[in-house]
Image: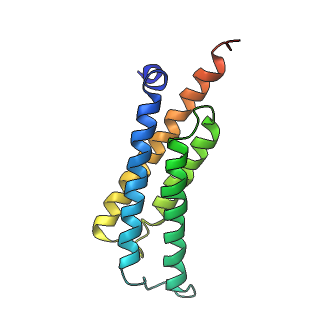
Amino acid sequence: MIAQLTGEHYRTVSRNLGVLVAACSAFSAVLIGTAPAPGGFGVLDPGAVKATMLILLGAVGVILTVAAAFGPKKLFAVKAAVFEVAAIANAAVLSPLLVLPIQGATSLLAVLAAMGLAIINVPAFHSASTRPQQK
């Protein structure tokens, strides 16, 4: 099943899950952006924490994820790294100090989809590296 997924349907699955991660990240960023600054950080500035999370979600969760999903097929390691960082960025906003009710569900969905994308890249990279090169 994994071989078929990474062989025939890799492009479709990668693009669909990449768009899902980007959409969930954008939705989470909008919800965090419209919410008041979080409290309870002690030493940290709540506005700076909010701005940092918005930048992470916008840059990594949306822009880099779409670029990696629609990018060239040969960059499996780079794609896996981008999807992992997108999963970490979405997981960071699941903090109890930042999370909003609906935003928690979309961030969790984005984390799971990004982890799935990173995992899909591993067998795709393996099958591409073991396949004989055509001249």
Which residue appears at 28% of the width and 65% of the height?
102
Q: Name the outermost residue toward the left.
A: 102
Figure quadrant of the N terminus: top left
- Colour option used: rainbow
Which residue appears at 41% of the width and 76% of the height?
33
Figure quadrant of the C terminus: top right
- Above or below, 75 against 56 in this view is above
Q: Is residue 78 left or right of residue 107?
A: right
| Snapshot quadrant of residue 134 | top right
| Snapshot quadrant of residue 130 | top right
Q: Is residue 50 left or right of residue 131?
A: left
Whole-percent x, y for residue 17 in the image: 41, 42
Q: Is residue 30 left or right of residue 82?
A: left
Q: Name the outermost residue toward the right.
A: 135
Whole-percent x, y for residue 64 in the image: 55, 53
Which residue appears at 68% of the width and 14% of the height?
133
- Above or below, 128 against 62 in this view is above
Which residue appears at 50% of the width and 64% of the height?
58
As rendered, which of 108 and 35 lies closer to the eye? 35
As rendered, which of 89 and 25 lies closer to the eye? 25
| Total labels drawn | 0
| Snapshot quadrant of residue 26 | bottom left
Whole-percent x, y for residue 20 in the image: 38, 48
Whole-percent x, y for residue 10 in the image: 46, 29
